[in-house]
Each structure stands twice: as C-alpha cells, then as structure tokens.
Amino acid sequence: MLRPVNPLKGSESGLNHIVLPPEIPRIFIDERVRVMDGKGHRWLDLTRTGTLIPRVRQHNLEGGPNIQDFHIFRPIPLEQIDRTVGGYPQNCGYIGADC
C-alpha cells in the first residue's frame, strides 16, 4: 500500500489562508475563453463555475431571453434513455421529464 510522504493537513498546507479577490475567477474565465475558443469547453466551464445563466443573459442577445435555470443540465439523449433497463428519467425541464 502506498502512503503519501509527509502529507499536509488543514492549515499546514496554507490553502486555508488563500483569499482571492472577487474579480480573479472572472479573469480566469475570460482568459480561458480566449485560449479555448471554438474547442467546445465553454458550456462546461460556465456550468462548473456557476456563471452560465448570468453570462448568457448578459452576452447572448438571442439566447439570453430564452435560457432557463434547467439549462445548466443538458438533455439526456432519447437513445440512452431507451437503452436503459427500466428506463431513465429525463433531466427536468426537457420534453419527457417527469418533473
């Protein structure tokens, strides 16, 4: 069995004391847009950071009025639902959902 050599716990790591200014996450997200442009990571990044809904409403003239809270989850493909023994529930908000 492998054990970590000299593992750091709690405040020993110093990670408990790092406080980022509120604009830092936005700067990271904006930079990642420029670096990963067109590579299909945008939706994942915005969903992971909890900024999908506000950013779409602010920056997407067509999608902004239509986006809803359930869009943080994508619909499960019908083919996947049909292949699952006993069925599988569709994510809430999409056609076929029981929510």
Image: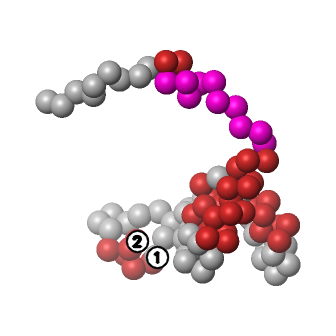
The answer to if 97 sits in the magenta stretch is no
Q: Residue at x 64, y 30 (%)?
A: 18
Q: Does any portion of residue 46 appear in the rendered image? A: yes
Q: Which residues are magenta?
A: 13-22
What's the residue type where badge 1 is placed? Pro
- Image quarter of residue 46: bottom right
Mark 1 or 2: in front is: 1
Question: How crowded is the residue under tag 1: few (<14 C-alpha within 10 Å), some, or many (20+)?
Answer: few
Secondary structure under tag 1 reads: loop
Residue contact between numbered discs 1 and 2, judged by CB atoms under 8 Å: yes
What's the residue type where badge 2 is placed? Ile
x, y percentage for residue 37? 63, 76
Find disc 2 in the rendering and name its residue. 81
Find disc 1 in the rendering and name its residue. 77
x, y percentage for residue 78? 45, 78
Please identify the dominant SS of the magenta region. Answer: loop
Secondary structure under tag 2 reads: helix
Q: In the shown orientation, is residue 3 left or right of residue 6?
A: left
Above or below, 68 relative to 38? above
Q: In the shown orientation, is residue 82 left or right of residue 31?
A: left
